[in-house]
Image (tube, rainbow, N blue to C red):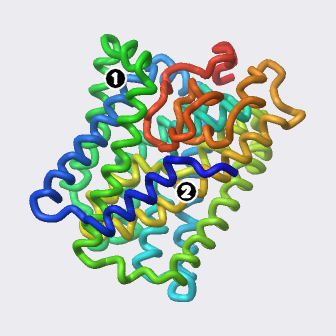
Amino acid sequence: MPIDPYIVLLLGTVGLAALLPARGAAADVTSGASTAAIAFLFFLYGARLSTREALDGLRHWRLHLTVLVCTFVLFPVFGLAARGLVPVLLDQPLYQGLLFLTLVPSTIQSSIAFTSIARGNVPAAICAGSFSSLIGIVLTPLLAAGLLGGEEVGFSTDSLVKIVLQLLVPFLAGQVLRRWIGGFVTRHKKVLGLVDRGSILLVVYNAFSEGMNRGVWHQVSPVRLAGLLGVEAVLLAVMLVLTWYGARMLGFGREDRIAIQFAGSKKSLASGLPMASVLFGGQASLAVLPLMLFHQMQLMVCAVIAKRRARDPEAATDADPGAATDADPGAATDADPGAATDADPGAVTDAPGGSAAHPVEGQPENRVLR
C-alpha cells in the first residue's frame, strides 16, 4: 500500500511543532492565520456545493438519516463504552480525545472519492457528507458539552458562536456568492485544493505548538499510544462492518450501501480541528491526536476497500469502468470527487478541496438518489 505524501506532511508538521513551536507574537499570528484558513476553506466548500443537489438530496432521507445515526449515535455509544478501557489501555486525556473523535461529523471529500471509485451512489455521498458536516457544526459542540462536561471542553454560548462564525457563516457566504464565483472555483479546483490542504497543515501546527508550549506531551507514553491505535483500529473495523451489513438489512441497494459505508464510518479532520481548538484550548493537541490517527487509518483502509468494491461482481454495469480499474488507492482519499480516478495522491484531506457540486465523470446524473 503506497504511503500518501500528505500523511508524511501531516506527520512532518507535528514534528516541526515539536522542534520549533510558535511562541509569543508568532503564536498569535499562527492562531489568527489558522482561523482564517479554515473559514476560507468552508467558504470554498459553500461555493462548490450545488444548492440544487442539496435540495434533491432531501428526497433520499432514509439514506441520510442512516448516515446521521451512524455518525452521531453509534459512534458516540462506542466512545462511551471505551470508558471501560481507562486506565488499562488509555489514560483520561487520551480517552477524552477518543470520545471527542466519535462526536465529530463525517468527512465530505473522502466519502465522495471512495464512493466514486467503488461505483456507489456519488450524489448521495455528496449530500450525506454535506448534511453531516453542517449539522455537526451545532450538534458536535452540544454533544461534547453533554458527554465530556462543560468544564472539560470549555463549552459556552461564546464557543458555539465562534464555531458557527468560523464554519457555518463562511459556508453560507460561499453559497450566496456561488452564482458568480462557482465556475471560477470549479475551474481552478486543483490549485485551490493546495489551499485546502495547506489550511489543515496550518491548524495542525498551531494546535501542536500550543500543546508543546503548555507541556502536555509528556502525558503520552508509547504504550498508551499503541493502546490508542489498537482501540481505533477496532472502532473503525466495527463501524465498517455495521454500515455495510446494517444497510443491507435495512433494504438499501448496493450503490446506496457503498455511500452509507464510506460516509457513515469516517470522521472529519477539517471540521474536528477548529472545533477542538475552540472547545479544548491549550489541551487541543491531545484532543485532536486520536482524530488525526483515526483520519490516517480510515484513509488507508477505505482505499483498499474501495478498490475491492470496484472489482465486486455486483458492481453496477452503468458505472464508468475507468473510475474503478484505473484508480490509484493513494488517490482515493479526501481528493476532489471529480478527480477520483486520477487525483494527485497528495490530495488526502477531508477538507472541501474538490468539486463536490458535480458528480464524477462517468456517473450519469439520472442515477441520483432513487
Residue 206 figure quarter: bottom left
Viewport quadrant of the C terminus: top right
The Cα atoms of the two marked residues, 2 and 1, are separated by: 29 Å
Residue at horizontal 31 percent and vertical 50 percent from the top: 202
Task: Indicate left or right for 340 with 162 as reference.
Answer: right
Q: Residue at x 26, y 57 (%)?
A: 278
What is the x, y in percent for residue 107?
51, 44
Residue 73: which disc?
A: 2
Is 342 on the left-hand or right-hand side of 49? right
Horizontal side of 296 relative to 133 (left or right) equals: right
Mark 2 or 1, closer to the camera: 1
Considering every residue shown, the one lying at the far left of the view is: 25
Identify the residue under disc 1: 175
Where's residue 72, x and y in %?
Answer: 51, 53
User: Which is nearer the eye, 55 or 315?
Assistant: 315
For label 1, the SS is helix
The amino acid at mark 2 is Val
Q: Position of residue 145 (x, y in %)?
A: 34, 64
